[in-house]
Amino acid sequence: MAVAQGYSEVNCLCVGGDRADTAAMAAWREVEQAEPEFAARVRRLFDAGRHKTIATLRADGSPRISGIECEFADGELRFGSMPEARKGADLRRDPRFALHGPAFHPQEGKEAEWPGEAKIAGRAVLAGPIDDGPGGDMFVADISEVVITRLNPEATLLVIESWTPRQGLRVVARE
C-alpha cells in the first residue's frame, strides 16, 4: 500500500464495524506543503469567524454537533475541549471528527463573491491537558480530508475542491 512521504497510516474501523481499513492521515503542515494556495484559502475561510462546528460520535454511534474554536499553529490544526465536555469524551472514545468552518451565506445578486465554506475531517489525537484557562484537553488533528465548497466565477456551478493524502487535490463542478 503506497502512502505519500510524510503521511502516517492509521488503522481505523470502517462504518459497519466488521473490517479494519488503513487510511492515510496528514498534519496541517503537509496540506500546506502539498497545496499551499488551497491550504491558504482553507485557512482564510476558517479564520473568517471565531466559532466553528465539530461533529463527533456519541457512545451509541449517533452524531453530535458542538460549537468549537480551533487554531492553526506550528504546522498543526489544534482544538480543545473543556473539562467534562461531551465532545471531549466523544473524541477520547472515538477520535473521528468533522470540523466545519464558519458559515456565511452568499448575498443575493453577489453570489459570485461568496468565498465558500471549508471543512476538515480526520482523527483527533489527544495532545495533553490545556495549561491555561479553565483546563480540559488539547487535541491535534490528524487530517484525512480537506474540502472547500464554493461557486464558480459565474455563480452557475457548485465547485467542490477536496484534498486527501492519497489522492491529492481534486476539483469537481456540478449544477
Image: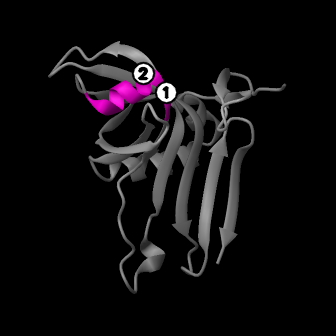
- Left or right: 89 as drawn, with respect to 2: left
Using the rendered view, name the quadrant where residue 134 is placed: top left
Where does the C terminus fall, quadrant-wise?
bottom right
* Label 2 Cα neighbours within 10 Å, binned few <14 / some 14-19 / many ≥20: some
Q: Can residue 74 be seen in this view?
A: no
Q: Position of residue 5 (x, y in %)?
A: 73, 23
Q: What residue type is labelled 2?
A: Arg
**Residue at 39% of width from left, 74% of height from top?**
106
Marks 2 and 1 close (CB-CB < 8 Å): yes
Magenta span: 85-96
- Left or right: 34 as drawn, with respect to 139: right
Q: Where is residue 2 in the image (x, y as percent from the top left)?
A: 83, 26
Q: Residue 23, labelled with which disc?
A: none
Which residue is label 1 attached to? 95
**Residue at 36% of width from left, 78% of height from top?**
107
Where does the N terminus fall, quadrant-wise?
top right
Q: Which residue lies furthest to the right in this view?
A: 1
**Residue at 61% of width from left, 61% of height from top?**
160
Q: Residue 92, labelled with which disc?
A: 2
Could you say which is closer to the camera, residue 19 or residue 166? 19
- Left or right: 168 as drawn, with respect to 149: right
Q: Residue furthest front?
A: 60
